[in-house]
Amino acid sequence: MIHRCTENDFEIMYSIINDAAEAYKGVIPADRWKEPYMSKDELRRQIDEGVEFWAYENGGDLLGIMGVQPVQDVTLIRHAYVRTANRNQGIGGALLKCLLEKITTPVLIGTWVNAVWAIRFYEKYGFGLVSQEEKTRLLKTYWSIPERQVETSVVLADRKWLAQR
Ligand SMILES: CC(C)(COP(=O)(O)OP(=O)(O)OC[C@H]1O[C@@H](n2cnc3c(N)ncnc32)[C@H](O)[C@@H]1OP(=O)(O)O)[C@@H](O)C(=O)NCCC(=O)NCCS
């Protein structure tokens, strides 16, 4: 049900991301919203930069994807997207659990400050929000994102990261 994405999944990954990202419309700052939210070039760049995507499949249909990216001494969970029609069925949770079982380093996740559903989702899996000061440092250390995205994002850390702080 959960497999590592291959080149054959590229188009469907692109469609899942942009369907799921509709959740951000009117929620994240207007200057951060784009259509499509993630272009094919950007998705390609993310893969080339080392984001390894995994997909949740049911009966041959891909319903959700989630990426992992090892960076220095941590692993980032990136680009978690479940199709709008398939939310709240445990798909995101199944993907997150599966990825966390494979990761041996501390884990960090960045999301939009206004994506309260995503923050609550990660908190259920033991992640905690880091302080404002810490989040800026972490986003600048482990992510390559524009300054404006740093301002409008939060970082959640897993228990391993929080314990070693
Ligand atoms: C965040 C996201 C990936 C979660 O995926 P999901 O498949 O909806 O996640 P789950 O179904 O595992 O969990 C979501 C909620 O459904 C609940 N749930 C899980 N299984 C359920 C079931 N069988 N029946 C009803 N509810 C269920 C969970 O308890 C959880 O509750 P919460 O809202 O109180 O946290 C998804 O909402 C999404 O794609 N959002 C848009 C993009 C986004 O915000 N991405 C995260 C950016 S980092």
Image (cartoon, rainbow, N blue to C red):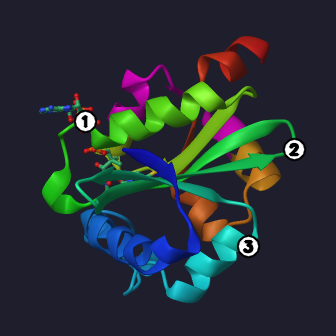
Residue 147 % position (x, y): 68, 67
Write the residue at 43% across / 81% down. 11
Q: Residues within 10 Å of mark 3 (few under 14, many from 20)?
A: few
Q: Name the quadrant where ligand 1 sits.
A: top left
Specify which label sits upstream in the sequence, 3 or 2: 3
As drawn, which residue projects farthest toward the left?
A: 85
Magenta-tinted stretch: 119-135
Specify which label sits upstream in the sequence, 2 or 1: 2
**How many numbered circles are shown?**
3
When the figure is inspected, residue 94 is found, relative to residue 111, above or below; the finding is above
**Residue 14 left/right relative to 50:** left
When the figure is inspected, residue 19 is found, relative to residue 115, above or below; the finding is below
Residue for badge 2: 72
Residue 2 % position (x, y): 43, 45
Separation (CA) of disc 3 from disc 2 = 17 Å
Q: What numbered label is drawn on residue 48?
A: 3
Separation (CA) of disc 2 from disc 1 = 30 Å
| Residue 157 visible in this rendered orientation of the protein | no
As drawn, which residue projects farthest toward the top?
A: 163
